[in-house]
Image (cartoon, rainbow, N blue to C red):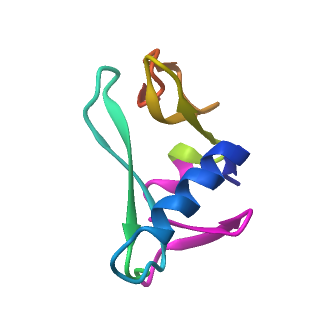
Amino acid sequence: MINMTPAAVKAVQRFIRGSETPVAGLRLVISGGGCSGLQYGMKLEEGKAEDDWELEVDGVKLLVDPMTFPMIDNVTIDFIDSLTHTGFKFDNPNASAQCSCGSSFKL
C-alpha cells in the first residue's frame, strides 16, 4: 500500500491536468543515487508496462515496477510548499536511514 497526503494528491492532479500528452498514471521508481544511496523518482507515464503494479490512491493512478514496490511499500508521499522547499517528500518506514529532505534513503 502507498499513501498520499491530500497535498500530494492535489499536486499530482495539477501536473496531470497540465500535461500535454495523455497520462496513464504516475510512475514511482527507485534508482541508485542521492545522499543516502537510493533515490525516489516520479514521472507521468503515457502507458503501463505489462508487469507494473497498478494502485489507485484518492483518484491518482500509481504505476510501480516489481523491483521498486517492496522498497516503497507503506510509504507516505507528501507535497511540501514552503519558503525553503517545494516538492514531494517521502516518508518510508522500510528505510534504515534517509536524508533530511526526504528524497533519498538507505535500506
Who's the residue at 44% across and 23% down the image?
A: 85
Who's the residue at 66% across and 52% down the image?
A: 2
Q: Considering depth in this image, is 43 or 91 the residue closer to the camera? A: 43
- Please say if 51 is above or below 86: below
- Please say if 23 is above or below 73: below
Q: Considering depth in this image, is 62 or 68 the residue closer to the camera? A: 62
Location of residue 5 in the rendering, given as x and y in whole percent from the top left corner = 70, 43
- Please say if 26 is above or below 102: below
Who's the residue at 34% across and 34% down the image?
A: 38
Question: Viewed as shown, does residue 99 lie left or right of 10?
Answer: left
Q: Is residue 52 magenta?
A: yes
Quadrant of res 27: bottom left
Q: Considering depth in this image, is 84 or 77 the residue closer to the camera? A: 84
Q: Which residues are magenta?
A: 50-70
Location of residue 99 in the rendering, given as x and y in whole percent from the top left corner = 43, 18
- Please say if 75 is above or below 65: above
Asked whether residue 4 appears in the rendered view, the answer is yes
Quadrant of res 39: top left
Quadrant of res 76: top right
Asked whether residue 106 appears in the rendered view, the answer is no
